[in-house]
Image: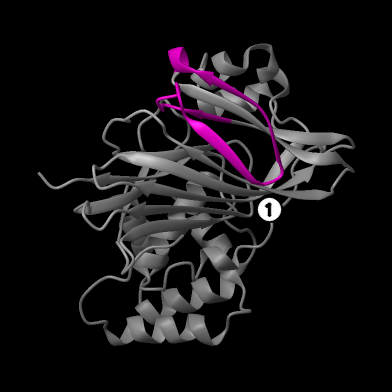
């Protein structure tokens, strides 16, 4: 994940850890983790205690397995621990997470995209997405999985979100996939517009009663199984939206990459930004971390092997 370096002088062990991670980019997760623990002079039980102080529970056995390469972090809870470990061990952002290999398959692989049960676990029961799609919720992009998702959100001088640009690389899980359905909610839908940049824009439905827009982006032809497609579009708000305080995306699968980029107007800059994670839309935030604004007045987070759930960035305006 992308996050800022901490201010202040780095001690000798921090510098060594950073050099070690940079010097061996092809190193394994276990080797870099093991070396960082050694350089920091921390026993694994102290590492476990520091994780626990952040509300992250990981057993000594699990940490030992990670250090010896007998297992690797894969679940959402474990990946949050990895992000915290990078701070605890004074490693650069992504130094550990970027080394995690592909998830090990578990159970029977069906080749299907996410079904309604998976969707409800993330969106919640009777969500606006389900209400907007109606009977189509059962087959909601069932024949597609996202490999990468890039989102750029633009916030204007009046602190309001004005547009969202989305680019996705998708893989077909079966022959015949022709289009993707996208749903945006919690927006003034009456006169919102959608423009396709890659792919062909199909039906657009505006549902003011649900504060939602449903649009289809067509690939132009049916895909073969495992074939990929690139789509990109921009949703522009028409009516005056309310003041924006956050943006989040509900992710039902595990894309290789998710990039969220928030661009602020130079005349309306927040005092702080935080990235966050929730396991589903109606649960409290279980992970939250401050991130910095860059020289272009924007803030971003980059997730690799992104776990299912709700990922977002929130910000606080000056009084």
Residue at position x 74%, y 30% from top? 142
Q: Give the image quarter of residue 316.
A: top left
Q: Position of residue 230 (x, y in %)?
A: 71, 50
Secondary structure character of the magenta stretch overall: strand
Q: Position of residue 282 (x, y in %)?
A: 41, 25
Which residue occupies the foreground of this view, 115 or 11? 115
- Tell me: residue 98, above or below residue 306: below
Label 1: element kind: loop
The answer to whether residue 238 is visible is: yes
Residue at position x 49%, y 23% from top? 212
Query: Circle 1: is it few (<14), some (14-19), or many (20+) Cα within 10 Å?
Result: few
Residue position for label 1: 103
Residue at position x 75%, y 35% from top? 179
Q: Position of residue 196 (x, y in %)?
A: 63, 42
- Tell me: residue 117, above or below residue 173: above
Which residue occupies the foreground of this view, 255 or 12? 255
Total marks shown come to 1
| The residue stretch that appears in magenta | 183-210
- Tell me: residue 131, above or below residue 184: above
Q: Is residue 158 left or right of residue 76?
A: left
Residue at position x 26%, y 35% from top? 243
Q: Is residue 275 left or right of residue 207?
A: left
């Amino acid at each position: 994940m992308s996050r800022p370096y901490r201010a202040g002088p780095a001690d000798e062990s921090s510098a060594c850890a950073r050099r070690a991670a940079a010097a061996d980019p092809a190193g394994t997760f276990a080797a870099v983790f093991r070396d960082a623990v050694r350089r920091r002079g921390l026993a694994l039980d102290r590492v476990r205690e520091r994780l626990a102080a952040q509300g992250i529970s990981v057993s000594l056995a699990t940490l030992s397995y990670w250090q010896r390469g007998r297992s690797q972090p894969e679940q959402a809870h474990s990946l949050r621990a990895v992000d915290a470990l990078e701070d605890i061990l004074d490693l650069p952002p992504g130094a550990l997470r970027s080394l995690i290999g592909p998830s090990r398959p578990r159970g029977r692989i069906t080749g299907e995209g996410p079904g309604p049960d998976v969707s409800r676990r993330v969106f919640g029961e009777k969500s606006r997405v389900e209400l907007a799609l109606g009977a189509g919720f059962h087959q909601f992009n069932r024949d597609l999985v996202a490999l990468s998702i890039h989102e750029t959100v633009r916030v204007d001088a009046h602190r309001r979100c004005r547009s969202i640009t989305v680019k996705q690389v998708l893989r077909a899980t079966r022959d015949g996939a022709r289009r993707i359905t996208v749903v945006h909610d919690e927006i003034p839908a009456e006169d919102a517009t959608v423009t396709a940049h890659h792919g062909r824009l199909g039906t657009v439905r505006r549902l003011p009663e649900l504060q939602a827009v449903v649009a289809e982006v067509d690939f132009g032809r049916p895909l073969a199984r495992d074939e990929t497609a690139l789509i990109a579009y921009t949703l522009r708000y028409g009516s005056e939206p309310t003041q924006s305080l956050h943006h989040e995306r509900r992710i039902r699968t595990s894309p290789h990459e998710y990039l969220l980029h928030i661009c602020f107007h130079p005349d309306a800059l927040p005092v702080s930004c935080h990235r966050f994670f929730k396991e589903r839309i109606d649960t409290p935030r279980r992970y939250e971390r401050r991130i910095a604004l860059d020289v272009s007045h924007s803030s971003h987070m980059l997730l690799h092997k992104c776990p299912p759930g709700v990922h977002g960035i929130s910000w606080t305006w000056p009084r």
